[in-house]
Amino acid sequence: MSGPEARMAHEIAEAPQAVARQAAGLAQPIAELVARLKRRPPQVVVTCARGSSGHAATYAKHLIERSIGTPVAEAAPNIASVYGRRLNLKDQLFLAISQSGRSDDLIEMALSARSAGALTVALVNATDGPLTRACDIVLPIGAGPEQSVAASKTFVATVSAVQRLIAAWISDAALARAVDALPERLAEASALDWSEAVAALSRTTSLVTIGRGPTLAIAREASLKLKETCNLHAEAFSGAEFLHGPVALAAARYPIVMFMPNDQAAPGMRQLAADLRRKGAALLTAEPGDAAPGRLPALPARHPETDAVCLVQSFYAMLIRLADRLGLDVDRPRHLQKVTRTR
């Protein structure tokens, strides 16, 4: 089923409430984690995740490196699960992100990191899974049950949980206020009219998504969702990465969707957009501003980090309509199931 009655549509609509109610459940474990991080600051943060959770880890990398200056590395879980190798992670922070908490390779990697002396943290939606037992601290995403195979509200709630963690870690009052305002803004973002994207993407089989800074994770998440729910081949790039070869794809027959950041990365992305238009690209940009051809509406800028989450909420709402236009059931992606067990 697609359209407004789809389970995924209901879960997209539930995202604002999920973000609002997670605050209470996260307060104590975040306080405990921040106290430990301040007593013994890590020299590196290692993330471990897959799928949409992996895109949330991409967002965490951006926010941690930009706000704290601590380098963030993405772990390859098969180093533990397939190759049996333990990484040298003593006194470092290991952050596993998962909806179900049941992926075998993530669990084995978390156990390996813990045995190596890392401070292990599970950011999970289902807190009764084995991943939580493998970690020192559990941060509950608090999104509630998600029945649709393609994650939506859990991704939004995971990113907002990361924002709450960083706001507490560095005592960033502005970010904390922006997260508190996020539920209302998410509801507003869901109602924005992305009809132009529905029309353009329903006529193609391949496209590119682009982001940078806080919106790189959004571009990657959008790319995955287009594959999962609409059977469209979509590749995600950073704005800088796109210039290193993939820019050769720019053409009127090959849509490009740019998720514009509202921070220091914005000028470079605007320059890239102008260059792509000169090259004749079929470009759609999601950004605030007056209505114009090729511009997908976005909420007025409030905070660059939470603004990025509002973009993905607008995208999700568009996705339901796109799948409906294509005659596809967003709740039953072919070949997929809700919990993916990999080793």
Image (spheres, rainbow, N blue to C red):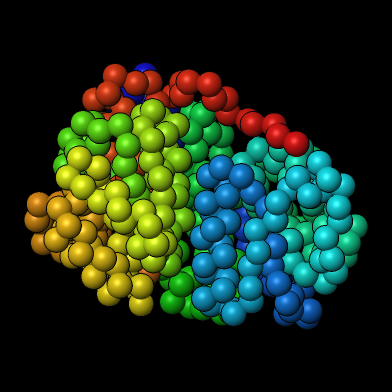
Specify whether 239 is left or right of 169: left
Q: Residue at x 35, y 77 (%)?
A: 264
- Residue 307 visible in image: no
Q: Residue at x 82, y 66 (%)?
A: 89
**Residue 212: horizontal and vertical position, in percent?**
40, 64
For the residue pair 138 and 208, the one nearer the viewer reads as 208
**Quadrant of the frame with the C terminus:** top right
Q: Is residue 91 above or below residue 79?
A: below
Q: How many marks?
A: 0
The part of the image, by quadrant, that contains residue 26 is: bottom right
Q: Residue at x 70, y 51 (%)?
A: 76
- Residue 122 visible in image: yes
**Quadrant of the frame with the N terminus:** top left
Specify whether 296 is left or right of 266: left
**Residue 301: horizontal and vertical position, in percent?**
28, 68
**Residue 230: horizontal and vertical position, in percent?**
36, 29
**Residue 185: horizontal and vertical position, in percent?**
33, 56
